[in-house]
Image: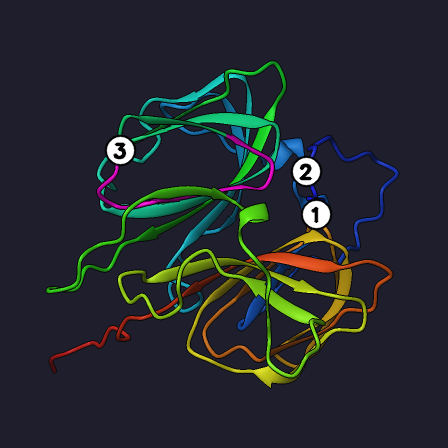
Amino acid sequence: MSYWVPRGGLPTQTELTTDRAVFTDAYAVLPRGTMRDIVASRLPLWDRTRLWVLARPLTGFAETFAWYVVEVAPGGGSEQPRPVGQEAEEAVLFVVDGTVSLEVDGIAHRVGAGGYAYLSAQSHWVLRNRGDATATFHWIRKAYERVEGVDAPASFVTHEADVAIQPMPDTRGAWGTQRFVDPDDVRHDMHVNIVTFEPGGTIPFPETHVMEHGLYVLEGKAVYLLNQDWVEVQAGDFMWLRAFCPQACYAGGPGRFRYLLYKDVNRHPRLRLGS
């Protein structure tokens, strides 16, 4: 498997200022070159760790999730990774480089590149880098929306190699999705999947729907429709879409085009009640 891994670095005075970064009312594109040392963040209770915040809840834009790319040096990590006061949040971790030691409810896991963990709101977890190389992972956070009479899902750890690509109907395998949870399982209120297009594969209509999206390109390149704009994207780029932003895709090759996808699912939209 191939995954783009940001390496940071500092911009030089000889670089062009013009790039593909854009923020609109309907979508944003953060090209891979935006993840530099000077915009990295730090977190309390995390040792030897830095991260790039790609998405955070913004009123009037996308409001359901936050997305980080986290880099943990050897010996780093956290015994209390969740923010204080945010214990009711769920998370997905997807490792793209190195290996992390992840303890979930007292059970230890070694999670390498391609490893995927769903961490439920009721689970306690700890993450450490006990190796001698830097580890990098995606961390997608969401407040879990409980429903009376519906049990919350349990945490689990798996690997993308153990999850088959399910082809979309009538595409002859040109477009497929690795689904880490059953789409019919309404205990889950978010899906984080991997979408793959073979060269020439397309989303053949402008998808326009209620789900918010984050899309991080793991591999390859494509031309992506975002609202009314066709945008060229490549491995390491992040796309951030508000609800109902039209989207479509042409994967031109020469290799596969793959991205990690977040969307909120299986819940009523929240209404503002009262006068």
Residue 83: image location, x then y, percent: 30, 35
Q: Is residue 124 left or right of residue 170?
A: left
Q: What's under tag 1, amino acid-wise?
A: Arg
Q: Which residues are magenta?
A: 111-123
Q: Choose between 9 and 247: the one closer to the eye.
A: 247
The residue located at (24%, 73%) in the rendering is 270
129 shown above or below 94: above
- Do the residues bearing badges 2 and 1 touch, measured as CB atoms within 8 Å? yes
The residue pinned by badge 1 equals 32
Q: What's under tag 3, amino acid-wise?
A: His
Work out whether mark 2 precedes mark 3 in sequence or the reverse, and give the earlier one.
2
Image quadrant for the N terminus? top right
Image quadrant for the C terminus? bottom left
The residue pinned by badge 2 equals 6
Residue 124's disc number: 3
Foreground label between 1 and 3 = 3
- Do the residues bearing badges 2 and 3 touch, measured as CB atoms within 8 Å? no
Pointer 3 local density, CA inside 10 Å: few below 14, some 14–19, many at least 20: some
The residue located at (42%, 77%) in the rendering is 210
65 shown above or below 11: below
Residue 194: image location, x then y, percent: 57, 57
Residue 7's disc number: none
Q: Is residue 267 left or right of residue 178?
A: left
Work out whether mark 2 precedes mark 1 in sequence or the reverse, and give the earlier one.
2
Q: Choose between 163 and 233: the one closer to the eye.
A: 163
SS at circle 2: loop
SS at circle 1: helix
Inter-mark Cα distance, 2 to 3 = 28 Å
Q: Quadrant of residue 220?
A: bottom right
208 shown above or below 63: below
Q: Is residue 270 visible?
A: yes
